[in-house]
Image (cartoon, rainbow, N blue to C red):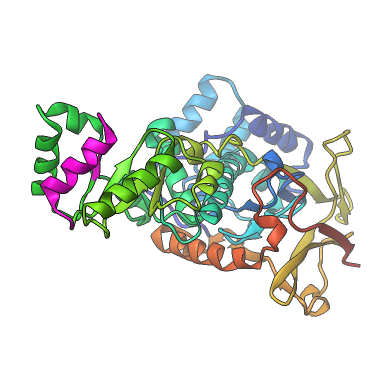
Amino acid sequence: MVAPSSQPSTALLTDRYELTMLEGALRDGTAARRCVFELFARRLAGGRRFGVVAGTGRLLEALRSFRFGDDELRFLRDDRVVDDTTLAYLADYRFRGSLTGYREGELYFPGSPVLTVEGTFADAVVLETIALSILNHDSAVATAAARMSIAAGDRPLAEMGSRRASERGAVAAARAAYIAGFGATSNLEAGRAWGIPTMGTAAHAWTLLHDREEDAFRAQIEALGADTTLLVDTYDIRTGVATAIRVAGTGLGGVRIDSGDLPIVAAEVRAQLDALGATGTRITVTSDLDEYAIAALAASPVDAYGVGTSVVTGSGTPTAGMVFKLVARQDAAGGWTPVAKLSADKASLGGRKTAFRRLEGGTATAEVVEVASGFDLPDAPAQHPDARPLQVPLVVAGDIDATAEGPEGVRRARAHHLRVREELPVQALALSRADPGIPTVHTSAD
């Protein structure tokens, strides 16, 4: 069974219709029907060529706290959301089903069964909102972060967008960005909660506080040492660089540039630093960077990037566009049947699924999704010796896999992402809008 959690309840992070459907199912006797729900993306948001799964560990931690305690039940009763029978069911709610899904950090493509939820209708339906809210947000941030990481190459990236997101969203975004290749965050709560390295020195306010720029630099060096990074563009950049080296010496750790035409300014600052003898002083650039701006700086003498607004908002694509659909269920006689939505442009594919990444010489060539007409799947791995299985058990009969949670889960997800990203074909690395980097191929498992 799922272990209890000391965290605040997550049960009301739920749309009302999840509970009204539950009430109806309890009334007509369908609540106990075994069901398979699937979370997937019909297409890659923003014309991206791949997506990155992120948020899995957060979802599992939220599942531990998905409990309807006295306060939650009182609200539902006072607001007349559901009837007494449903309240009694919710008072004892524990997710007793199973979750299977792509590992956190894994790549996904259109139709990839990112998460499969198996259980009774009553067990599973109430998880729709929280699963989508976490995975849609975190996967959007991680996908944007991965594109920036690819554009940056070996140069380190720091996430510094907390002030451009909600206070809790900022922590989640820092986590997702780290999984997808960023090396540090400015957010201290993300560092505490998820073990992400933190960074940061001073803003323009520090320089403006002092009577002279030189006074600000000198005080910062006395406090943080000569290896610190000085922000040199509060006034005049050239003067700021000269002052920084005069105060810190040629061993200054770095300078940060937050304005101007960055390719031109970076080249000028590098030339000035070298002329002053500060050949080892690093240049960090910030200033509204996204993956395109980072790519444009590839030939510039830049050592590191700091990214804010763009990464925490998904670089213009703030949601992954994933959906949560019922794809198989038991009928009145107990047999299994695939079900699917047929609406124009919103169709789903019925049937329980398993997925593989087909590889040739270590390079991904296709996403293979096998679909079963019933509930049981064949020994699909034996049928795909040239492919890598993509799904892993996350929750089995209510028992959560703790290895996906906490700081260790984040480290595992980051390592997995960086490893599987190497499988991408060259065309998937491009930043322009286009078709997915590999096709999704559906086959029958029967």
- The residue under the point 19% across, 55% down is 227
Farthest-out residue, front: 275
**Residue stretch in magenta:** 230-250
Q: Please tell me how many numbered marks the rendered image carries.
A: 0
- Percent coordinates x, y for residue 295 in the rendering: 54, 48
* Residue 54 in the image, given as x and y percentages of width and height: 55, 52
Q: Quadrant of residue 422?
A: bottom right
Q: Nearer the viewer, residue 394 or 343?
A: 343
Query: 149 or 274, which is in the foreground?
Result: 274
The correct choice, above or below, for 368 with respect to 381 in the image is above
Task: Estimate the x, y position of residue 161 in percent, counting from the top left.
Answer: 41, 38
> Seen from this angle, which residue lies furthest top?
79
- Regarding residue 91, the answer to whether it shows in the image is yes
Residue drawn at x 80%, y 49% as measured from the top left: 327
Query: Residue 186 location in percent, x, y?
Result: 33, 44
Towards the viewer: 17 or 385: 385
Q: Give left or right: position of 270 versus 351.
A: left
Identify the residue shown where x is 84% and y is 54%: 351
Towards the viewer: 246 or 248 = 246
- Residue 323 in view, yes or no: no
Q: Please determine whether, in this image, residue 198 is positioned above or below residue 162.
A: below
Q: Is residue 256 above or below residue 345?
A: below
Q: Residue at x 46, y 57 (%)?
A: 3
Task: Indicate whether residue 136 is drawn in magenta.
Answer: no
Q: Quadrant of the C terminus?
A: bottom right
Q: Is residue 226 left or right of residue 335?
A: left
